[in-house]
Image (cartoon, rainbow, N blue to C red):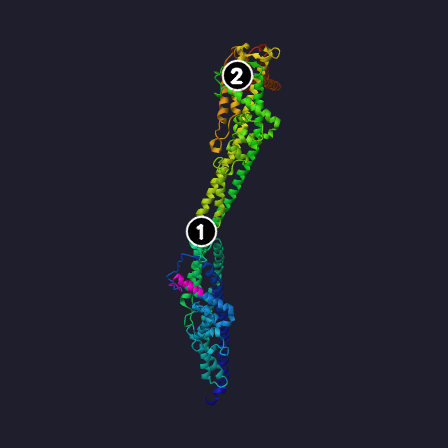
Amino acid sequence: MGIFEGITHSEEIQELLDDAQSQYDSAKGRLDTQKKNTTKSLEKLGKEKVHAWSKDMNKFLDSFGSFNNVQMVCKIDENYNFLGKNETPNELMVNMRNASYNAGEIIKAGALSVGTGALVGIATYGGVAMFANASTGTAIATLKGVVKKNATLAWLGGGSIASGGMGMAGGTVVLGGVVVGAIAVAGGLIAGAKGKAKLAEARRVHAEAESAVSQMNVVITGMQGIENVSNNYRDFISKLSGLFTPYLKEMDNIASKYQRGSDGKVDFNDLSEMEQKTLHLSWLLAQLYYHILSAPLLNEQGEIEPSSRQLLQKAQQEYVQLTGQATELENEKKKINDLLVDAQKTFSKASQSYYKKKQTTSNKLIDIGKNRIDLWEKTFSPFMDSLSNFEDISVSNTYPYSVTDIPIEFIFESSDSVLSYIKRLRTSGIDALGNTGFVEVALFGGEDFLGELSQLDNDNNAVNSVHRHNMSLWFTGELDPTISDNTPFGEVSDYYISTVKQTVDGISGRENLAQASAVNQEVKDLSNKIGRAVSDFDATIKKIGIIEKTLKKYNKIQAKFLKKIEEIRAEHQTANETVKYDLLSEAEKRVFEMSFVMAKIQYTILASCILTQSNGGDVDDADIVIDTANSAYRSLMRDSFKKAGDDDIETINVMWKENADRAMVVGFATAAICIAVMIAQLIAGNLIGLVGIAGVLIAFPIFFYFKNLSQNKLFMWRCIRIAVAILVVGAAEIIRLVV
């Protein structure tokens, strides 16, 4: 081609060189951009590690250092080459301390003072350079020294030659197996070939450019890999910090609960199970933090450390496991907290219910005591007044329906003492008896208590001079505290309640699940016992109500006998003189005898106690007395129903008149029903309804022809007529329906 080659091929040469330049510039631009991105990512990771060492790890060392005798275990998977996996706990702690101190020095000096290269070094080679002995300036100098010795770090973080870095001419810099400095040669060839290159030279330069572009793509890919690994590590460190930080505060909270020893530290053995678990988990998190902060991303050749991705993957697995442990720990804490909150609520509700019910019961007992004093008067004053009109009363105590073996003479004497004191009390004012006195009467009948008072002079201290049951004093708060605290009502005492309260209050914050469960169960047991005690309080008031109701029933029956006795007095008394008992007929004497039986029933019911040993009383005889009284009276009614002798006619008429009168009312009602049925059937055109007239005649209680019948026979006769009337009318209705 000769001398015309340059002219003939100039256009092709120019195209080759322009294309080489374009490809090279484009690749170099992407290389520079990726370098900046990679450097920026590593710089951020370096700052993240410095912050983690200086803040989180330093805080851990301070908080964890508040405890001694901690059983530390190094938890490392032997299949992965974690930095420091062969280090003892003490060696780990020393390295953590040095790295944290040096990181703190960097923070004080300012991150910019160490340069981007040093931060990149921290990012890529972990905390190795930071584990040197801690002293001012050592960390910074060491890090800068690492940068100077490592061409890759100098190239990534050092910048251009003018700024002290190695620039693109760093011939020893190798990334992805490519010598970075060699890439710059291609750029020089392109620049030197312009304007004077021959076609062959242009083709060679173009080939060199393509080779350089290919190498730059390899370097870009390598830096992208470094950036990705860097970003992944930074994200993981941030996530791990979020899990780790709360435990730093929690350790401080735990340490603040305990008194420190002479060495200024808290003994690990003094901690609760949950607190020990918290410290153990904090130590495991610190180890994981240590390993991930120390893990190198690049090897000495500037290539990605093959195990770095595996280490991060393993660290993430460890993170998941520790997160699971943290969740279990938090769930356990929540369960403990829920148990204790439930225990506190249950205790508060139960104890308030107990004391409120006790106070309410005390107030009711005071009112009941006043009412029971009235019952003493209403029950025995009429009886004693009636007997005062007779003399030489002699009643054989062989009557078979008595509820007590107490002689009637003793009942007379005791009742007279009680009534005399009540009369005196009415004069001085009923409130002089005091709240405890009223409760004493309500709970224990008051027969002994009021009888003793009647023997004493009328002074203000008389009530305090006689025996009062502890339970009466307990209800009104007058019992000595040392005795009161241990006085049980049911299975509950003030001491028992206060002991459980101390347990509930004392365990908070220093508990474990077993203790919390035990406390919760103890409170539930107390609550159940209090529930039974509250029921006993209610049962006490209810039982008193039954006593009063039963007593009023027999007072009503006694009133009939007293009315009969008054008729006997009116018949035999002359000139207001007392009536001699011997002058009475046997039937009249039987009225007296029955009245005395009723007096015994009234006395034993009125004087009965209503608390048992289990709920603080001496003995509960109220139920027995009431059952015995009712049983005796039923037997008496049953036996008297069969008798018709003149000796019993008076008592029979007294006891059966009310029943006979009731039968009369039922007879009228039955007759009215028969009339209604008859009218309804006649309106419907059923002449069988006329049978209702027979029912009316049979049921209608016209018994004036039988006025001399005893009341028991009258009752029986009326019941028979009612039954026959119902049978007649009912049979007529059945016949109507069948026909």
**The C terminus appears in which quarter of the rendering?**
top right
Task: State the residue position of label 1.
Answer: 272
Between residue 248 and residue 699, name the one nearer to us.
248
Type of secondary structure dominating the magenta stretch: helix
Residue 722, disc:
none
Q: Quadrant of the N terminus?
A: bottom left
Percent of width and height locating residue 218: 44, 72
Q: Considering depth in this image, is 353 or 121 the residue closer to the camera? A: 353
Left or right placement of residue 733 versus residue 236 in this view: right
Q: Amino acid at mark 2?
A: Met
Q: Residue furthest bottom?
A: 3
Determine whether 452 is above or below 561 in the image: below
The residue wearing badge 2 is 594
Residue 334 seen in this snapshot: yes
Q: Is residue 195 magenta?
A: no
Q: Is residue 228 something that shows in the picture?
A: no
Specify few, some or many for label 1: CA neighbours under 10 Å numbering under 14, 14-19, or 20 or more: some
Picture coordinates of residue 67, whole percent (x, y)? 44, 57
Dot 1 amino acid type? Ser
Secondary element at tag 1: loop
The x and y percentages for residue 371 are: 58, 27
Do the residues under discs 1 and 2 have CB atoms within 8 angstroms?
A: no
Where does the magenta region start and end?
83-97
